């Protein structure tokens, strides 16, 4: 290979560079003339994007035709045009992982070539591309993988910031003030609390008497709760979870009316339905209008991912065993579990564990710091009842994560294969059984994405079962 490369004469290389420059300038002139003749604003932007991407294609063609240079690779030379999520800073990930010296040098040269090409210095860019491919013929795939991992890290870092929470709470308060002035309905007891109810519940409340009160089971015993003002009772209920609130409401009719106060459910809705529980493009006002500003109905009927527990899928399959007796057939029932834990920041933990680890053992360990086989960390979002889990990276400890500032000398291989090659994407359907629980998830798709090439391949799921929610008391509701 080295003897072939050294046989290129300066005259041939200069002539080839001149020819490449002339063809490139001619192509630019023709495209600019076509754009100025009949292009609108949208088409002009599209042509500019094609002009920016075309140097990669031209430089790839020139590098493939040059003598002594390896044949054309299946992907264009230059930076990847596919960004998995968010913006990225390549130096963040590369500072945490090291590559073999030869591959690292080739990658640095390749980056310099990309910078020169983006700045318009095509001659130097072409020379640097050639130099990088002479040092390592697969440097472009390594570059794509490093850029993809850096973009994943940036996306995961962005999900840990809840900068929009305060703005959403302010909009909720402003909206509530408008609702209270337009849809205020005084209770039958004469209290000034706002209670907006659905049609079915309103028809039930219509049959309640006007003078509601707490009455004892034994008429001779006093009812101390009757002496507590409704405003104070509402303050107590605001400190409870939804299960406790509904249990209190089932005591009597007066408790039901008090538990319908919109102040209680407004705070729950405002704290729950923030990104990623709703898309950043979706306005909570439109959601409230859909449910006629009934906050309790929004909390019960609008899809949401439960954060106060773990979604667990218990899967089984039968494996044939060996038997010394030909008249006896032995089959083994194999059980394994899949776990999904969602965080309000948009981070999600995925774990696949066999029957050696029971849920009672796994749940206390299910944290981002866990390192065991089958453990993945990614990001999640929800649109209507469809949950999209992306950027699932292997966090078992086999590969360094973009956010791990750990020494990588002990995990590096000579060929640079120590980094993650694949990321996974999972699509699920959220179901509520019964209404308001949102406790079931069905797997719709599970795909693997190659970080170097961008190829997407489905993962076979033969024995998978739905995820069912299991509450964990130590987990926060939001």
Image (tube, helix red, strand yellow):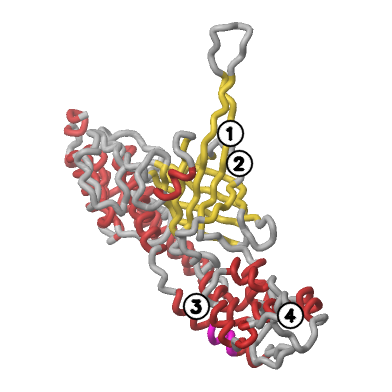
- The foreground one among 350 and 75 is 350
What residue would you read off at disc 1? 316
Percent position (x, y) of residue 419? 31, 42
Sooner in the amino-acid sequence: mark 1 or mark 4:
4
| Location of residue 153 (image quadrant) | bottom left
**Nearer the N terminus, badge 1 or badge 2?**
1
Q: As rendered, which of 98 and 291 lies closer to the eye?
A: 291
N-terminal label among 4 and 3: 3
Q: Which residues fall within the magenta stretch?
A: 173-177
Which residue is painted at 32% across and 48% down in the image? 401
Query: Mark 1–mark 2 contact, CB under 8 Å?
Result: yes
- Quick one: SS at disc 2? loop
Q: CA distance from mark 1 to mark 4?
A: 57 Å
Q: Which residue is mark 2?
A: 465
Residue 235 locus on image (x, y percent): 54, 82
Q: Is residue 176 visible?
A: yes
């Amino acid at each position: 290979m080295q003897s072939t490369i050294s046989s290129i004469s300066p005259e041939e290389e200069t002539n080839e560079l001149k020819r490449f420059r002339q063809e490139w300038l001619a192509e630019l002139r023709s495209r600019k003339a076509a754009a100025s003749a009949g292009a609108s604003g949208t088409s002009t932007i599209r042509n500019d994007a094609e002009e920016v991407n075309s140097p990669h294609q031209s430089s790839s063609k020139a590098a493939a035709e040059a003598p002594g240079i390896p044949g054309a690779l299946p992907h264009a030379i230059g930076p990847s045009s596919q960004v998995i999520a968010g913006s990225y800073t390549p130096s963040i990930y590369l500072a945490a992982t090291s590559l073999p010296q030869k591959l690292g040098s080739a990658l640095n040269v390749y980056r310099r070539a990309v910078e020169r090409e983006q700045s318009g210095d095509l001659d130097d860019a072409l020379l640097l591309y050639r130099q990088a491919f002479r040092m390592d013929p697969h440097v472009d795939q390594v570059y794509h993988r490093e850029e993809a991992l850096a973009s994943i890290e940036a996306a995961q870092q962005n999900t840990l910031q809840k900068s929009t929470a305060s703005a959403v709470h302010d909009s909720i308060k402003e909206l509530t003030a408008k609702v209270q002035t337009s849809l205020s309905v005084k209770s039958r007891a004469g209290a000034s609390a706002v209670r907006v109810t659905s049609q079915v519940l309103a028809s039930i409340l219509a049959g309640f008497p006007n003078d509601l009160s707490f009455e004892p089971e034994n008429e001779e015993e006093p009812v101390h709760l009757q002496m507590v003002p409704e405003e104070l009772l509402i303050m107590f209920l605001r400190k409870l979870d939804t299960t406790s609130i509904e249990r209190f409401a089932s005591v009597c009719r007066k408790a039901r009316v008090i538990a319908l106060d919109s102040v209680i459910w407004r705070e729950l809705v405002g704290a729950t339905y923030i990104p990623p529980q709703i898309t950043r493009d979706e306005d909570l006002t439109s959601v409230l209008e859909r449910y006629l500003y009934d906050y309790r109905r929004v909390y019960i009927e609008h899809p949401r991912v439960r954060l106060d527990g773990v979604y667990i899928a218990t899967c089984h399959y039968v494996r044939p065993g060996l038997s010394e007796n030909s008249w006896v057939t032995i089959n083994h029932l194999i059980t394994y579990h899949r776990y999904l834990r969602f965080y309000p920041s948009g981070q999600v933990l995925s774990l696949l564990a066999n029957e050696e680890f029971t849920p009672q053992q796994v749940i206390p360990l299910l944290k981002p710091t866990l390192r065991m086989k089958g453990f993945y960390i990614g990001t999640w979002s929800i649109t209507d009842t469809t949950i999209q889990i992306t950027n699932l990276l292997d966090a078992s400890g086999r590969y360094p994560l973009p956010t791990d500032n750990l020494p990588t000398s002990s995990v590096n291989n000579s060929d640079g294969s120590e980094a993650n090659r694949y990321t996974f994407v999972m699509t699920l359907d959220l179901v509520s059984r019964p209404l308001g629980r949102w406790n079931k998830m069905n797997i719709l798709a599970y795909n693997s994405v190659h970080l170097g090439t961008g190829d997407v391949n489905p993962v076979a799921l033969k024995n998978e079962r739905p995820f069912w929610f299991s509450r964990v008391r130590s987990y926060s509701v939001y």
